[in-house]
Amino acid sequence: MESTHSAHAGRFPWAHIVGYILSLVLTAAAFWLVLAHKAGLATTLVVIVLLGVLQILVQLFFFMHITESDGPAWHTVMLLVGFLFVVAIVGGSIWIMSFGGQVVA
Amino acid sequence: MLEQVKDFASHFFVTGDPLIYGADVSIVVVSLAIIFVLTYFKRWGWLWREWLTTVDHKRIGIMYLIAALLMLFRGGVDGLLMRTQLALPNLHFLEAEHYDQIFTTHGTIMILFMAMPFIFALFNIVVPLQIGARDVAFPYLNAISFWLFFFGALLLNISFVIGGSPDAGWVSYPPLAELGFDPGPGENFYLLAILISGIGSVATGINFMATILKMRAPGMTLMRMPMFTWSVLVTSMIIIFAFPALTVALALLFIDRLVGAHFFTLTGGGDPMQFVNLFWIWGHPEVYIVILPAFGVFSEVVATFSRKRLFGYSAMVASLVLIGIVSYLVWVHHFFTMGASADVNTFFAIASMVIAIPTGVKIFNWLFTMYKGRIRMTMPMLWTIAFVPCFAIGGATGVMLAVAPADYQYHNSYFLIAHFHQVLIGGVVFGMLAGMYYWWPKMFGFKLDERIGRWAFWFFNIGFYVCFMPQYALGFMGMTRRMYTYPEGLGWGPLNFISTIGAYMMGIGFIILVWDIVYSIRYGERDLTGDPWDGRTLEWSLPSPAPHYNFARIPVVTGRDAWWIMKYQMKPEERPDLGPIRPIHMPKNSGRPFIMGVAFFVSGFGFVFNWFVPAIAGLVVVVLCLILRSFEYDAEYYIPVHEIEETEAALGRL
Ligand code: HEM
Ligand SMILES: [Cu+2]
């Protein structure tokens, strides 16, 4: 446990700073796009989903040490499982909730 | 001025109902009694040092257990109140609004503040001991999880004397749960209580996944893990991936209510059914979150008390994993009647039925484990055996509900109510009680009395069937859920009356169970060996209760049922040499998790009433706690060898 602190001591945490700025920019961009009504509905949706995916990547690479591991790479396995569930849930929800347009105006 | 205070108080405190005044009095009396006892016996320091600041998984587990039993009591009283109201037609024991509040808190408490802490109690108490670890992967986070659960539960519970209880059902669907139809703080209590405790639940999932994947004793491969640990691993995975959906659903609803957004209102382009969709993306996996640990308990109990290895270990593992995955793909069966396309309903109907297959595999494996075993009818085994037929019926009625066209008839009728109580009581509650009886000696060093336990068991068990079997029939007769009363002449009276009798029998069973605990604290058989049931897994190799570092030396595992092998199949000279005792690295206690819990509570309470000063202040304290933790470099210590040797010698282990 001590080693986790000392391993990075001394070096300036560039990765964290860059990641922090990137994640702020991505968040602000999504908000701006929605609040400013600059694009049509479909474009807005696609773009904010893309921004969201980028956000996930930033978190994984800059903060969550995705590239480090000792022992079996369990985190990769779990990410894969998570990916499958996300596809099922998002894809499933779109399929389920796009029923009869008469209800959702 | 005085008028203003009076006016404020009459809204702030719930008034008007004699039941509530009774509760007010008893809350004040009990609180005063607790304060008096702690002060009189000078126990405040002890409480703080030994419990409130502890990061020891065994103590956190015990606190979860106490909380779960208290919540079982509170939820049970809610249940009895509802059953009393429904005993006869046209009763006015409870008025409609009060009835709504009670069924809402009943459901919310039983699932989120009874079943969840009960499984977390067993996670904490058992998993590190079963895998030969000295604590969980993140003990400090573990304490945070507990206190977030605790203060979340407290927030929901005070709603009934302060501000008013939520009343939109435990599923709290919009539009009913939106501000327009449900003004007042009740619904906010529901949302914030679950949001806060939900953070803790996700953290627990992460914690136990990391613990099980990373901290097993040498030699314990995945396929040598005890079955309870396996169930916790799969459950943790489900928790991690399911709870965020609930958090999102509730947070969006909260934003709707707080700042007038339109995520779930039809005006403004929102869609209430999207809440229902998100809720059940969590909701169905949730029922498996609470049942899988019970399955784990049954596997341990059946093997131990049949004196046999668990039958079909790999099939058991495979079914657990399969259930874990398929449980994500069935959520629509809770809202077939929404009217999605026939393709959607067909897919989810079939997926739901598929779950019955791995479940059936597990049931047969338990039966085969018992077959030709030398069965001992102890309390844990009794609860396990009672579970089998009960859950079989519950599963069968589940499959009936999963037939989408038929569900248009069953949906939201008493048939549904009977189904889920059968799986939740017959599965989860029986399982947790089996686990409690089984591991009780490991927690406290004495057994619970079997004779009294049997009385509790029979009252509860017979009471269960008397209470819920009539409800299947009532469902067929057209009685729908959440009605606070019904007219005469529909023929529902007799069955409802019988059901209420059953509910009271279960209540008596619970009281006897509490009596069993009280009695056994004094007279229960002491466990001096650490292995009172002739167990098979590593927790039974330790003294009861285990010393706070668990294992003086980390054991080496050579097969499944590691302790059984060490006990009976290995000659002393074959035992692996564990080397000398070395200093043990342990986490220090910390008061910060508790303080964070308090801060979350203050913040949540502020948001409930839209008082932004406490709401923000609480969050600031939370962030402060996080920052302080980041700069804490001295959170661990070593137990010196001589201290370990003294402890072990005192336990007769050297
Ligand atoms: C073979 C297994 C099962 C199947 C096929 C099944 C199927 C269903 C279906 C179709 C419904 C929705 C019915 C309706 O709303 O009309 C339902 C409701 C429910 N089930 Fe199950 N179920 C199964 C096992 C379980 C288990 C193991 C649990 C819990 C431990 C459980 C807990 C619940 C709950 C709590 C509800 C109702 C929630 C509510 O509306 O308030 N079920 N089940
Ligand atoms: Cu379900």
Image (cartoon, coloured by chain):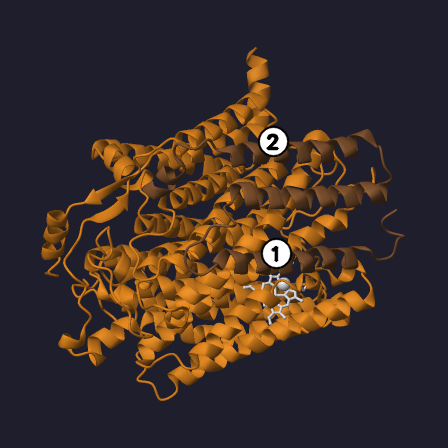
Chain colours: A brown, B orange
Q: Is residue B498 visible?
A: no
User: What residue did someone put label 2 on?
Assistant: A21
- B547 to B541, vertically: above or below: above
Q: Is mark 1 within 8 Å of ligand 2?
A: yes
Location of residue B511 in the rendering, given as x and y in whole percent from the top left corner: 38, 57
Location of residue B281 in the rendering, given as x and y in whole percent from the top left corner: 65, 56
- B394 to B480, vertically: above or below: below
Which of the pair B277/B93 is nearer the observer? Answer: B277
Q: Quadrant of residue A45?
A: top right
**Mark 1 belongs to which amino acid?**
Gly
Which of the pair B26/B38 is nearer the observer? Answer: B38
Q: Specify the quadrant that holds the C terminus of chain B.
A: bottom left
User: What residue did someone put label 1 on?
Assistant: B283
Where ligand 1 lies, by quadrant? bottom right
Residue appearing at x 80%, y 61% in the figure: B340
Location of residue B310 in the rendering, given as x and y in whole percent from the top left corner: 38, 79
Q: Specify the quadrant that holds the N terminus of chain B.
A: top right
Q: Is residue B399 visible?
A: yes
Residue appearing at x 53%, y 45% in the figure: B198
- B580 to B636, vertically: above or below: below
Instruction: Report in which chain the residue with disc 1 lies.
Output: B
Location of residue A38 in the rendering, given as x and y in whole percent from the top left corner: 84, 32
Distance from Cα at disc 2 to Cα at disc 1:
36 Å
